[in-house]
């Protein structure tokens, strides 16, 4: 995790994410790409593409540059290499494009979550990035001046399709020297006996070199509640999930447990794309 991208809208939650990213970068001798996307009301895409020719839009850009410069002078960024990026683009697409262009290892974002109609009809850039990013995304909900991952909960069905993203999960856990709690959530609609669930997890874990881990089977009324309740019981520092990145009508009807966790979990959440 040497190359970390942090989007900012200069909000408090965005700074929470930047502080955590700085701690991760310092431990790994890494660098940070600090990104701000200027989403401005325009009459069409042409106005965005020719923004550099419009003096009134340049005023917004210059103001953003000044704010970024102030942010980059924060003491917690001392001795870190930080590259600032300001562009006219939709936030979530710009975040993903820059992450891919700069070959980052991790995206760290702040989020205050959402609920009700706001969650259904508006969503958040954090949700959209989680849904679309091929790069792991770490969501930070609150300020943490001592970000450590001693207990890392990863919930899954541990099917074959999880094996590829799970390689990144293991790398993440091992880099933090975290205890990885592998958990299967049993629900009334998707129930496995203890014997069957345990066999699946044991066979799955045998394919990887995990420094410290344990397996768990947890029963609850649905997967999201099961993950949140189990994470509370083991006092997890981080919750991990893999995501299919469903889009369109499939996403609307099926939803995404990862995105629900991004919205509802009070603990940090990291997602890995299948």
Image (cartoon, grey):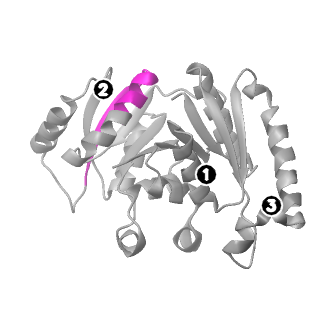
Q: Position of residue 68 (x, y in %)?
A: 80, 43
Residue under pointer 2: 213
Measure the alpha-carbon separation of dots 1 and 3: 30 Å
Measure the alpha-carbon separation of dots 2 and 1: 28 Å
Q: Position of residue 150 (x, y in %)?
A: 46, 25
Q: Position of residue 63 (x, y in %)?
A: 87, 52
Residue under pointer 3: 52
- Asked if disc 2 and disc 1 are in contact, CB closer than 8 Å, the reply is no
Question: Left or right: 223 with respect to 109?
Answer: left
Q: Residue at x 31, y 38 (%)?
A: 166
Q: Residue at x 22, y 60 (%)?
A: 188
Graded by Cα atoms within 10 Å as few (under 14), some (14 to 19) or many (20 or more), the crowding at tag 1 reads many
Question: What span is in magenta?
Answer: 169-186
Graded by Cα atoms within 10 Å as few (under 14), some (14 to 19) or many (20 or more), the crowding at tag 3 reads some
Question: Left or right: 101 with respect to 48?
Answer: left
Q: Residue at x 65, y 29 (%)?
A: 22
For residue 111, the mark is: 1
Q: Position of residue 45 (x, y in %)?
A: 67, 73
SS of the residue under disc 2: strand
Please tell me which of labels 2 and 1 falls first in the chain: 1
Q: Is residue 144 in view?
A: no
SS of the residue under disc 3: helix
Measure the alpha-carbon separation of dots 2 and 3: 52 Å
């Amino acid at each position: 995790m040497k190359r970390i991208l942090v989007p900012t809208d200069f909000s408090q939650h965005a700074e929470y994410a930047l502080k955590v990213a700085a701690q991760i970068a310092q431990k790994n001798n890494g660098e940070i790409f600090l990104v701000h996307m200027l989403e401005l009301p325009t009459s069409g895409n042409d106005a965005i593409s020719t923004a550099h020719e419009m003096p009134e839009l340049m005023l917004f850009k210059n103001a953003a540059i000044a704010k970024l410069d102030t942010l980059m002078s924060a003491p917690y960024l001392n001795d870190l290499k930080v590259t600032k990026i300001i562009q006219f683009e939709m936030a979530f697409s710009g975040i993903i494009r820059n992450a891919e262009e700069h070959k980052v290892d991790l995206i760290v974002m702040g989020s205050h979550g959402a609920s009700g109609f706001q969650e259904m009809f508006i969503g958040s850039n954090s949700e959209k990035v989680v849904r679309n990013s091929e790069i792991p995304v770490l969501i930070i909900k609150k300020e943490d001046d001592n970000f450590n991952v001693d207990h890392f909960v990863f919930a899954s069905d541990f099917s074959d399709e999880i094996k590829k993203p799970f390689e990144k999960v293991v790398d993440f856990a091992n880099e933090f020297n975290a205890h990885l709690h592998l958990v299967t959530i049993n629900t009334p609609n998707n129930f496995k006996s203890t014997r069957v669930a345990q066999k699946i997890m044991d066979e799955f874990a045998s394919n990887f070199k995990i420094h410290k881990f344990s397996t768990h089977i947890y029963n609850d009324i649905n997967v999201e509640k099961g993950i949140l309740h189990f994470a509370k019981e083991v006092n997890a520092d981080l919750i991990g999930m893999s995501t299919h990145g469903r889009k369109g009508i499939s996403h609307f009807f099926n939803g995404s447990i990862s995105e629900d966790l991004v919205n509802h979990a009070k603990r940090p959440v990291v997602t890995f794309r299948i």
